Image (cartoon, rainbow, N blue to C red):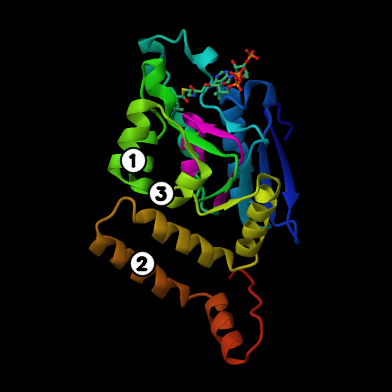
């Protein structure tokens, strides 16, 4: 499929990773409807493709994404946003079963920060800046900023960020647990691809079950979550890959997974 606002390519040692590059550099990758629709389509296609094991979403050196497109949004009326269910298409990303890694260099603000938080793992370049500046525009986050940020870094820090619009740098984002690792900006995307490649080399159904269990921890009580985890763990025993993994360990050889 031909895209206008993003680029997609297959990367990694076995071409098993889909790299989605947000490609609206003049507007710092402001997330207009067309761009987010394209991201949704690309990610859904990657999720369905049996050759693909993981997805990386990135921007450019200056911006992962500087937020929802303010110019597109500024004249919208309440009936328009409510009747059109504005932003509902963004949730498509969160239904993906394959892991998504955000490689963030530069600004990840507003919807850009929310997009990164919809991904499963965030790797940050040392020039990354995260923030929810909506309050400065007379509005509030609308794609999970008030919810996912609290779960990622706790209420006090999330309040501080959302109520002031202040940005945090990569170092603070790492200390707070918002990102998994910080790399020099030149190496960040490559490190994200290496991580995606490693995940893509494992059993796809088992990776999907592991992601499902961790994602469910956002929504379930500890007891419910542990019950789901136990059921998914038991389910891995229906797979040849589970047998292969354990046989390979016992035989001191590398496991070869077949995704079944
Ligand atoms: C539309 C944007 C934009 C945005 C930048 N641009 N961010 N256009 N929507 N969110 C455009 C600018 O208008 C400008 O276009 C070009 O990108 C370069 O930006 P500059 O401001 O000139 O760059 P710089 O001086 O380096 O400042 C970078 C910046 C600043 C600090 C990131 O651009 C900024 O504050 N942007 C807005 C950040 C923000 O408020 N994000 C939250 C949006 S609301 P021209 O044509 O002048 O060259 C939001 C709601 C989420 O995300 C709700 C759920 C999704």
| Mark 1 CB within 8 Å of ligand 1 | no
- The crowding category of the residue bearing disc 2, from other C-alpha atoms within 10 Å (few below 14, some 14 to 19, many at least 20), is some
| Magenta-highlighted residues | 100-118
- Look at 67% across and 38% down and name the residue there: 21
In front of the other: 130 or 252: 130
Disc 2 element: helix
Magenta stretch: includes residue 113 = yes
Q: Are marks 3 and 1 in contact (CB under 8 Å)?
A: yes
Disc 3 element: helix
Q: Which residue is mark 2?
A: 229
- Please give left or right for residue 83 compared with residue 205 in the image: left
Outermost residue on the bottom side: it is 251
Mark 3 vs 1, N-terminal side:
1
Q: Are marks 3 and 2 in contact (CB under 8 Å)?
A: no
Q: Which residue is mark 3?
A: 176
Question: Residue 218, position in %: x, y?
Answer: 34, 51
Would residue 109 be visible to someone looking at this image?
yes
- Residue 157: give its label: 1
Mark 3 vs 2, N-terminal side:
3
Would residue 95 be visible to someone looking at this image?
no
């Amino acid at each position: 499929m031909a895209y206008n606002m993003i680029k997609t390519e297959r990367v990694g040692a076995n071409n098993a990773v889909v790299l989605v590059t947000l490609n609206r550099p003049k507007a710092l990758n402001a997330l207009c409807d067309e761009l987010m629709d394209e991201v949704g389509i690309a990610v859904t296609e990657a999720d369905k493709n049996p050759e693909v094991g993981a997805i990386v979403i990135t921007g450019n050196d200056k911006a992962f994404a500087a937020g929802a497109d303010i110019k597109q949004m500024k004249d919208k009326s309440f009936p328009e946003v409510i009747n059109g269910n504005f932003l509902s298409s963004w949730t498509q990303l969160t239904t993906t079963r394959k892991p998504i890694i955000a490689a963030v260099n530069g600004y990840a603000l507003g919807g850009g920060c929310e997009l990164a938080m919809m991904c499963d793992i965030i790797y940050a370049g040392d020039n990354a800046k995260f923030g929810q500046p909506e309050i400065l525009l007379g509005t509030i986050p609308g794609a999970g900023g008030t919810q996912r940020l609290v779960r990622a870094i706790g209420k006090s820090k999330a309040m501080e960020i959302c109520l002031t619009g202040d940005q945090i740098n990569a170092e603070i984002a790492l200390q707070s647990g918002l990102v998994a690792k910080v790399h020099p900006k030149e190496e960040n995307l490559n490190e994200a691809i290496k991580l995606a490649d490693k995940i893509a080399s494992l059993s796809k159904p088992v990776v999907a079950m592991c992601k499902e269990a961790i994602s469910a921890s956002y929504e379930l009580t500890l007891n419910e979550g542990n019950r789901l985890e136990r059921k998914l763990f038991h389910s891995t025993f229906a797979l040849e890959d589970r047998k292969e993994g354990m046989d390979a360990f016992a035989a001191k050889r590398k496991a070869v997974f077949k995704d079944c």
